[in-house]
Structures are given as C-alpha cells and as structure tokens.
C-alpha cells in the first residue's frame, strides 16, 4: 500500500500568495521523488490553478487547497471560498486547458462551484 501525505492549505485568494501554493506542491512532489521535469510541470499547473480561481476574487475570499501526494501521483482539490461575482470566465478556463491540460492525467473544473480537481501521475 502506498503511503499518502494529505496536506490542507488555506490562503487568501490574491495573487501575492500564489508562490505559497506553488512552493507547497513542489516541495511535496520532491519529497516523494518526482523528477525535476515533473516538479516544474506541477509548479506550472499550480500557477494556472491559482490564476483561474483568483480571477473573481473579492475582499476576504480564500483558496482551499487539498493536496494528496504519494510516490505515484499528486492529486489536488482546489476551491475558492468567499464572495464571487459569478462563474469562472470561459476564457480563463480555456487558458487553463490550453496551458496545462496536456500535462495532467485527469482534471475537472466545476465552474459554478469555483472548484478544480486534478491528478498528475508520476512518469515511470
């Protein structure tokens, strides 16, 4: 059975905290033996995820990030909590798909709930 680390992180939904989310996913992947290429992919994936979810930010909103990391994969559930003006912009969803869709083994975006679920399997 694979040992999985579960880490929950809540950060303000502003771009200034994007580096915290990126550093966290990279650190967890490095601890589990992911390659430098895979870690760089995860950094990009995290940046695009936070960019997508902070697009409708309002004062006092937060991002809830739930990381589940094993030797074989990284799974992330990310959602925005707080006051938002509507659904995620379609252009932002398209940008996410174009930028990182091919890097992911699975992803789902729930536009109405401001939620993203994604999985990146380890190569080899």
Image (cartoon, grey):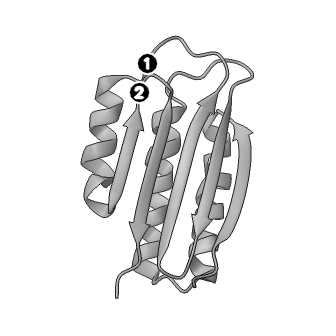
The residue closer to the viewer here, 87 or 3, is 3
Q: Which residue is mark 2?
A: 111
- The reply to whether callout 1 and callout 2 are in contact (CB within 8 Å) is yes
Disc 1 is placed on an element classified as loop
Q: Quadrant of residue 3?
A: bottom right
Residue in the picture at 54% in, 86% down: 33
Disc 2 is placed on an element classified as loop
Which of the image's four quarters has the N terminus? Answer: bottom right
Which of the image's four quarters has the C terminus? Answer: bottom left
Residue in the picture at 43% in, 53% down: 118
Circle number at residue 79: none
The residue closer to the viewer here, 84 or 40, is 84
Q: Which residue is mark 1?
A: 87
| Residue 44, percent from left and from top | 43, 58
Residue in the picture at 73% in, 43% down: 10
Q: Earlier in the sequence, mark 1 or mark 2?
A: 1
Q: Give the crowd class for mark 1: few <14, some 14-19, many >=20 residues within 10 Å.
A: few
| Extreme-top residue of the structure | 85
Residue in the picture at 63% in, 52% down: 66
| Residue 68, percent from left and from top | 60, 64
């Amino acid at each position: 059975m694979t040992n999985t680390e579960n880490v929950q992180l809540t950060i303000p939904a502003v771009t200034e905290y994007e580096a915290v989310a990126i550093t966290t996913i990279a650190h967890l992947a490095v601890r589990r033996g992911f390659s430098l290429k895979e870690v760089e992919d995860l950094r990009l994936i995290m940046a695009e995820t936070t960019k997508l979810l902070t697009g409708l930010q309002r004062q006092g909103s937060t991002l809830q990030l739930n990381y589940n990391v094993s030797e074989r994969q990284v799974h992330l559930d990310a959602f925005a909590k707080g006051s938002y003006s509507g659904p995620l912009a379609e252009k932002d969803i398209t940008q996410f798909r174009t930028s990182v869709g091919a890097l992911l083994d699975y992803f789902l975006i729930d536009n109405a709930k401001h939620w993203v679920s994604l999985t990146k399997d380890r190569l080899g």
